[in-house]
């Protein structure tokens, strides 16, 4: 099993690179952002509740996203491994993920952290906002808040995974292809 946490601030390229990684390595893609947007598109109770947080650039409560990931893991018992994209985002989520995977005896193999300068993050998100229709990509103050929330609540996970010897920094500036090559080298070194 190859279980990878793809990590980085908003706009770092997690979703972009996860799509390529799952194709090459045959992993199951678990993106909490995509799952939440799917719930919203379906106008479910969970989706409408999540929208209140997402539109402001705040994190959706831990209990909601942890429950979602638990059921997705259970739905894929025959997977070769998982790529966790945008999850975990808090220490409570990381601890819950370790517990869920511990029960299945398939721990996280490594955490790959995309490093991108703030100005580039803002430009990428505003660029996506012009075509995606995502409310959280169209307002500069919401984007700034997402980056602040990342620095406050999510960046401490670098220490969490470093303590387990699983943290790998990846230069996330450059072309999508060049960054993908760096990620593949890091993944191949994990197993
Ligand atoms: P996510 O869906 O995870 O959104 P993201 O961080 O903005 O996306 P990502 O990082 O994948 O985008 P990418 O750079 O690939 O979360 C959205 C919201 O959902 C959160 O704010 C939160 O409210 C909620 N949420 C999700 N998970 C949660 C959790 N676990 N706990 C609580 N709340 C949660 O793409 C950005 C743009 O950059 C694209 O246009 C792409 O084409 C472009 N790009 C990518 N790589 C590039 C490159 N190398 N060069 C130029 N452009 C590039």
Image (tube, rainbow, N blue to C red):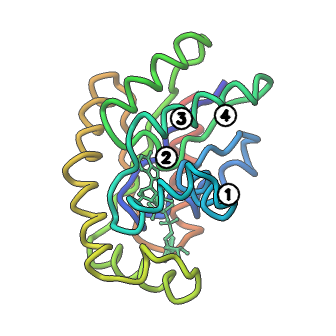
Q: What element carries label 1?
A: helix
- Mark 3 surroundings: few (<14), some (14-19) or many (≥20) residues within 10 A: few
Locate residue 173 relative to residue 30 in the image: left or right.
left
**Mark positioned earlier in the residue sequence (3 or 2):** 2
**Structural distance between the alpha carbons of marks 4 and 1:** 20 Å
**Image point 58% across, 86% down: which residue?**
131
Question: What residue did someone put label 3 on?
Answer: 189
Question: Could you say whether the residue bearing mark 2 is in a helix, strand or loop?
Answer: strand
Q: Check residue 20 in the rendering and tell me which mark sits there, or answer none.
A: 1
Q: How crowded is mark 2: few (under 14 residues within 10 Å), some or many (20 or more)?
A: many
Q: Mark number for residue 6?
A: 2
Q: Is residue 182 above or below residue 158?
A: below
51 over 66 or under it: above or below? below
* Residue 69 tag number: none
Residue 155 screen position, x and y as percent: 26, 47
Q: Mark 4 points at which residue?
A: 72
Image quarter (top left, top right, bottom left or bottom right) of the C terminus: top right
Side of 18 relative to 42 (left or right): left
Residue at 67% in and 24% down: 1
Q: Where is residue 60 in the image (x, y as percent from the top left)?
A: 40, 49
Instruction: Looking at the picture, tell me which residue is in the foreground, 186 or 153.
Output: 153
CB at disc 4 and ligand 1 closer than 8 Å: no
Q: Where is residue 80 in the image (x, y as percent from the top left)?
A: 74, 29
């Amino acid at each position: 099993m190859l279980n990878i946490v793809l990590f980085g601030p908003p706009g770092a390229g997690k979703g972009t690179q996860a799509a390529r990684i799952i194709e090459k390595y045959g992993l199951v893609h678990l993106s909490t952002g995509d799952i939440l947007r799917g719930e919203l598109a379906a106008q479910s109770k969970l989706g409408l509740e999540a929208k209140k947080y997402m539109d402001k650039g705040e994190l959706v409560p831990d209990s909601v996203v942890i429950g979602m990931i638990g059921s997705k893991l259970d739905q894929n018992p025959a997977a070769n491994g998982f790529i966790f994209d945008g999850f975990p985002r808090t220490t409570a989520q990381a601890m819950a993920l370790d517990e869920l995977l511990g029960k299945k005896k398939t721990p996280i193999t490594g955490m790959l952290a995309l490093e991108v300068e703030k100005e580039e993050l803002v430009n990428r998100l505003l660029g996506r906002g012009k075509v995606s229709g995502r409310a959280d990509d169209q307002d500069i103050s919401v984007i700034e808040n997402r980056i602040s929330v990342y620095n406050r609540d999510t960046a401490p996970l670098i220490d969490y995974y470093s303590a387990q010897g699983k943290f790998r920094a990846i230069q996330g500036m450059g072309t999508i292809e060049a960054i993908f090559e760096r990620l593949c080298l890091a993944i191949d070194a994990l197993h």
